[in-house]
Amino acid sequence: MRTCNQLLQALSVGECDSALTPLYALDGTEASLKEARSRALHVVRSFQAAFSPAPGVPAALFSGPGRTEIGGNHTDHQHGRVLCGSVDLDMLACAAPNSRRTIRVRSEGYPVLEVSLDDLCPRPEEENTSAALVRGVAAKISQLGHTLGGVDVYASSSVLSGSGLSSSAAYEVLLGNILNHFFCGGALDAIAIAKIGQYAENVYFGKPCGLMDQMGSSVGGAVAIDFADPADPAVERLDYDFSQSGHVLCIVDTGSSHGDLTGDYAAITQEMGSIAAYFGKTVLREVPQEQFRAALPALRERCGDRSVLRAMHFYDDDRRAAQEAAALREGDFSGRFLNLVNASGQSSSLYLQNTWSTADPRQQAIPLALAIGAELLDGTGAIRVHGGGFAGTIQAFVPRERLSLFQSGMEALLGQGKCHVLHIRPAGGCVVFA
């Protein structure tokens, strides 16, 4: 293990370049590698300034990436299938053990938060705060039988706020990897760390999320997940190299706010649930599609047409997520995979109906961005709503030769800096360099 000064020396002479390249320089340019090296140096120096570690204390660099949903829009809460992936925007941290029974985290731009390892019970007043996530991750790892010690963490985030890239999952996965490295001997694998993060978010943070966000961040690359058993989902990492696809992943910020959309999100779960309840089930995955189709007239009367349409979306997008994974396994990106992504986007718009809120019909930034984006793609690539919907971001796979046209067109509509070029990175949460 290296000290902070030894980390700085290794970064300065390029000794860390082979570790940084597959995380941050996926476009193959020296400029991206130089930027990654500079950011890592900044994080280590900032750690030293914030915590003044004692000489000889081992330190390491850690990463918790954001994640993007690729397939399966609103299928996970019905125990369906999804396809997601980790991206090259992340939380990068330098961390080292301290002599206290305390976890201290300094997120760039924020004051230090401290969590005592002697008090790991949930605190209602901490709900929806970073302290809740720190306490929850530490609590779960302790429950698993590991003895934790104090640690200091300085973290810098490049995960876009409000982008649907799940900064909370990145934070949880980052913390899980830090504690795993220093106190668990690396015993926790990526799936265990994802489940620890979900526990922290559910029990301590107060958000009843599924496991897709944490799994996408923790496992790395493209990840196919089947939530038929949500307590033990089937997880498959797909070794597809997106850099060889001839397309670029873009996340476009439409500038619309997620505020006051809780009711819209809840309605999707409630309406899909009402269809399942008609058959005496809890979620749609438990209802065979043939039974659903045979009961359409009665379901329209009992549950309403929108509930029926949203259930239709579930069955189709659940199947599409599995088909997208198969297309990547077979290397069929430009044909089958892109067609499935487009079909998923159309289903979200027409059946799931999560591209704008009926509470504010004047605000339809996502449908407008999808319409202009489709015009710019002109029959190539693929485009869809990204994440929960109703506001926020859209996702597009853009042919490299059309990237400049697409990016300039979207930013002419939405503003400079709104179209972000991302990469699916092959590694999830990890120790970058130690």
Image: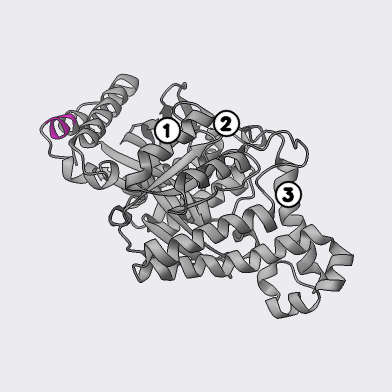
Residue type beneath disc 2: Gly
Tag 1–tag 2 contact (CB < 8 Å) = no
Secondary structure mostly seen in magenta is helix
Q: Crowding at label 2, few (<14), some or many (≥20) Cα neighbours within 10 Å?
A: some
Q: Which residue is mark 3?
A: 266
Residue type beneath disc 1: Ser
Tag 3–tag 2 contact (CB < 8 Å) = no
Q: Which residue is mark 1?
A: 408
Distance between the Cα atoms at labels 3 and 1? 35 Å
Residue type beneath disc 3: Ala
- Mark nearest the camera among 3 and 2 is 2
Q: Which residue is mark 2?
A: 255
Segment colored magenta: 8-12
Q: Residue at x 36, y 56 (%)?
A: 221
Distance between the Cα atoms at labels 1 and 2? 16 Å
Residue 386 in the image: state x and y as whole percent: 54, 47
Give the position of the C terminus as an image quadrant: top left
**Could you say which is closer to the camera, residue 114 or residue 332?**
332
- Specify whether residue 234 is painted magenta: no
Distance between the Cα atoms at labels 3 and 2? 22 Å
Residue 306 in the image: state x and y as whole percent: 78, 58
Q: Residue at x 42, y 33 (%)?
A: 408
